[in-house]
Amino acid sequence: MADDMALAPLIRTSVVKTSNGPVRGYVEDSLQVFKGLRYGAPPTGEGRFKPPRRPAAWSEVAEAVSYGAPAIQSGMAPGERGSSAGDPPAPDEPGSSEDCLFINVWTPGLDSAKRPVMVWLHGGGFANGSGGAAMYDGGALARKGDVVTVTVNHRLNVFGYLHLGDVFGPEYAQSGVAGMLDIVQVLEWVRDNIEAFGGDASNVTIFGESGGGWKVSLLMAMPGATGLFHKAIIQSGPGLRGATKADAGKTAQAYLDLLGVKDAASLAAIDTETLSRASVKVGDRMRGFTPVVDGVALPRDPFVPDAPAISADVPVLIGTNQDESTLFMIGDPKFGELTEEDLAKRSKAAAGDKAEALVAELRKVHPDYSPTYLVSAAQTATGMWLGSITIAERKAAQKAAPAYVYMLTWETPVSRGRLKCPHALEIPLVFDNVEKARNFVGRGDEPQAVADQMSSAWLAFARTGDPNAPGLPAWAPYDADTRATMLFNVESRVENDLNAGVRKVLQS
């Protein structure tokens, strides 16, 4: 809550009654904006590692004019800002906290227009990130498409995905998916309240990038989320599987042993910083704690061995960027100077016995790529691209709602062009936030030309389940015969069975 002096320059919205209590936001460039809306009680103390609870109802008007606290970032202390996810926070985003269950809403009007609703799930794996990153500002998208945009904070890393059910019993049976249950509670909030914000609870699209795309994948297999969303967009984050209870249980036991904890009460009493710092000592900072196939909240892997039946009627838009891995490689001192020997070694790490055949096919696709970029291409193909194709194939095999596949091929000029078309480049283009991300997309008119196309496609999909939009070539759903893929660039085009030789090697 901000004080009256801080709020004085703002034009306030009217008061909106929600299921938790009355709220008031501010007006910004014809939009009604609500930041830091609380959707859950603080998941602290004995509420740690448990499913979210509704907040205590309030009767005084809550001023929703600044972002709520993001979740504790992996290995970081409370109050620290930023994350290893790489998405800079907005200037008014506070430091991190366990008390992080907040959402942000941008809407063109507090009326009965029943606009499509787009709920964004941030990246950063399951370890980092927040809905308050500068690139995620939902204003431009809401204004352009006459939609309601929502961004989300939820529990991450050890606070969201520590599987304690095998150790502490039924009360903690869903601790390994607590962060995902936070998102389900957000979607319940949308169902119950979004009409008061000018939205349509029967036309909700969930979309996310990287870890956010994986979250979208998981929600498609979660019974508790069934009916709460109606379209799904997975950007550079195909989630085929969740963690097994066995693996998650071993990680949890190692963590408890490190802390010297033997009972739930002792764990609840430990301070936040100690829990956070210890978490990175028992596993990879980004992958140590991920959602668990617990048999109840998440009863199966999202897309193994097939697409989940409970979301068969949900259209999917899925795709990748051409050079995803350059963003992760550019910090390597040898970036740009890798040798053929490095290529052989690193491609084998990515593709195993298929490495030689894979590199041969990638050379045909990218004859101008040096060993550095061929390594990136191999890592991209074996990871996000193959996973995305697999989801599209399995979705299409249901012969129910369609899947549409895209690839961004436009290359950013920043860093002297060394990144080419990296991971996360599509985010400011999809959000139509070019001016907020010039340090990533570069100067000139090209970024906006691509953003015009991508944002229009995303908005069309959110409205109808079909991404075809004016200015784009005809885009057919994906199937095993034609495998249509939209290639987004300054001049976009559709190609059937994109990189067929690469696909055949990887699927052989």
Image: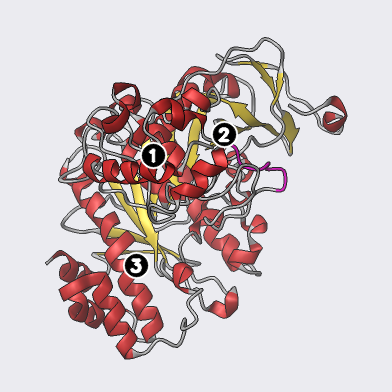
Residue 242 at least partly seen: no
Residue found at x 33% / y 33%: 164
Query: Mark 1 or mark 2, which is nearer the start of the sequence?
Result: 2
Colour theme: secondary structure
Picture residue at 23% right of the left edge, 83% below the top: 360
Q: Residue at x 45, y 52 (%)?
A: 280
Vertical relation: 123 (above or below) 216: below
Where residue 478 sits in the image (x, y, percent)?
25, 52
Q: Decide which of 100, 315 is in the foreground and name it.
A: 100
State whether residue 142 is above or below residue 47.
below
Residues marked 2 and 1 touching at CB (< 8 Å)? no
The N terminus, quarter of image:
top right
Which circle's residue, 3 or 2, is located before the other in the chain? Answer: 2
The amino acid type, in three-letter code, at marker 1 is: Tyr
Q: Is residue 493 magenta?
A: no
Residue extent of the magenta highlight: 91-97
Q: In the rendered image, which quarter contains the C terminus?
A: bottom left
Image quadrant assignment for residue 265 = top left
* 368 on left or right of 133: left
Q: Position of residue 467 (x, y in %)?
A: 40, 47
Residue of label 1: 161
Instruction: Indicate which label's residue lies in the foreground, 3 or 2.
Output: 2
Residue 491 to residue 234: above or below: below
> Which residue carries the number 2 mark?
100
Query: For residue 5, what is the image quadrant?
Result: top right
Residue at the extreme left: 508
Callout 1 environment at 10 Å: few (<14), some (14 to 19), or many (20+)?
many
